Amino acid sequence: MKNYNVGVLGATGAVGQKFIRLLQNHPWFTIKALGASGRSAGKSYKDAANWIESTPIPSAIENILVKNCSASEFEGIDFVFSGLDSSVATEIEGEFARAGIPVISNAKNYRTQPNVPLLVPEVNPDHIELIKTQTFTDDGSGWIVTNPNCVVIPLVMSLRPLFDNFGVKSVILTSLQAISGAGYPGVPSLDILGNVIPFIGGEEPKIADEPLKLLGTLKKDSVEYARFPIQATATRVPVLNGHFLSITAALETPPADIDEVINVLKDWKSPIAELGLPSAPGYPLHVYDDPRYPQPRLHADSENGMQTAIGRVRSSNVFDISYVAMAHNTIRGAAGGAILNAELLVKKGYLN
Ligand SMILES: NC(=O)c1ccc[n+]([C@@H]2O[C@H](COP(=O)([O-])OP(=O)(O)OC[C@H]3O[C@@H](n4cnc5c(N)ncnc54)[C@H](OP(=O)(O)O)[C@@H]3O)[C@@H](O)[C@H]2O)c1
């Protein structure tokens, strides 16, 4: 297996730091370049980043000089991961793709562009074929792949088996989102401690839209979106890691009983299970029978933060079913999800 030289854009931010921690000792990918804003460029990484991870900065990283996010400074890099602020991601990620450097991004900017895959390997691995229709470069060497909003991960991971087995008519959910999802320094402590904030700007439209692309059908050069309404209420809660969702769904074909739903969720098989991707969780979905679980503090780190935990699966008095779902927002919902995307892209021959 070739070892790939990778860069991280937005390397000093919360997601960028998670990339650095998760890529330490990665069997296929080695970080060779780090990029951030002009405020950080020219400094060593340890001086530029306000490190918030719970393990030390890897010694191979701490003295790397941070670069400006300009493609000309990333020569010899096979591809980049992006944890860029959305205010700059359109321009910078586009520049890298046009320069023939593939971009695997966490930012929202290109997620809904028709020929850019919004990718979750266990949910829609076939959508990577959209890469072939991108025109950033004449020879197809530069392209962009995105991963979804961090709330969308537990939602779409749990909807995939339900959608395939019963069809989904409509979904109503409330998200209880961890503070790490707001980056650093994030929400002021006096706002969030002992409190719930009932609105997160810009979040609800992404939660309503992105699952429909992910569950959509690949056509020639775009995805035909799945068609059902999703109503979301996004709230911020004083939890460190792990976005927790309370979900109620109406199904096209109502199940015979709730055990049928539980069995569908428990028996679901990941389409990438046999590919041997280093970051793929052995059990991408776990269904708890104990009604006390899942809990963010106990379960967000399950399977190295890559598992979606489901619980409280029950009949609904209003729609067909209700349940809760949770996933680690900065691992599965951000850096870890992007690394898994890159591993799938290697396996499918898009990165060479
Ligand atoms: N946090 C999460 O759970 C999460 C989950 C999924 C997706 N995302 C997305 O991931 C991205 C990063 O989020 P975050 O929480 O890591 O944000 P963050 O902590 O604010 O980090 C932002 C990064 O962007 C860089 N940056 C800002 N302005 C720049 C410029 N003009 N040129 C180049 N680099 C610039 C910053 O560099 P400096 O340090 O030099 O300013 C920093 O490295 C966002 O698009 C966010 O929506 C976040």
Image (cartoon, grey):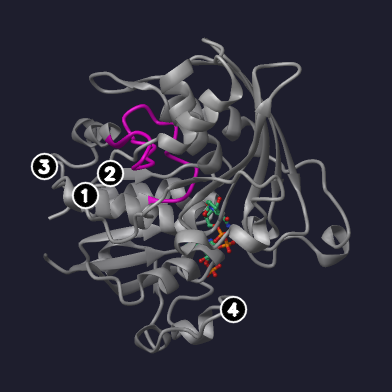
Residue hosting label 1: 275
CB atoms of marks 4 and 1 within 8 Å = no
Disc 4 residue type (three-letter): Asn
Is 234 one of the magenta-colored residues? no
Disc 2 to disc 3, how far (Cα)? 28 Å
Disc 4 to disc 2, how far (Cα)? 36 Å
CB atoms of marks 2 and 3 within 8 Å = no
Task: Specify the quadrant of the image occupied by residue 23.
Answer: bottom left
| Residue 149 falls left or right of residue 82 | right
SS at mark 3? Answer: loop
Binning the other alpha carbons within 10 Å of mark 2 as few (below 14), some (14 to 19) or many (20 upward) gives some
Image quarter (top left, top right, bottom left or bottom right) of the N terminus: bottom left
SS at mark 1? Answer: loop
Q: Position of residue 323 (x, y in %)?
A: 65, 34
Residue hosting label 2: 272
Q: Is residue 178 visible?
A: yes
261 or 199, which lies in front?
Answer: 261
Residue hosting label 4: 50
Disc 3 residue type (three-letter): Asp
CB atoms of marks 2 and 1 within 8 Å = yes
Closer to the observer: label 2 or label 3?
2
The residue sitting at 86% across, 59% down in the picture is 191
Disc 1 to disc 3, how far (Cα)? 28 Å
| Residue 100 falls left or right of residue 205 | left
Q: Earlier in the sequence, mark 2 or mark 3?
A: 3
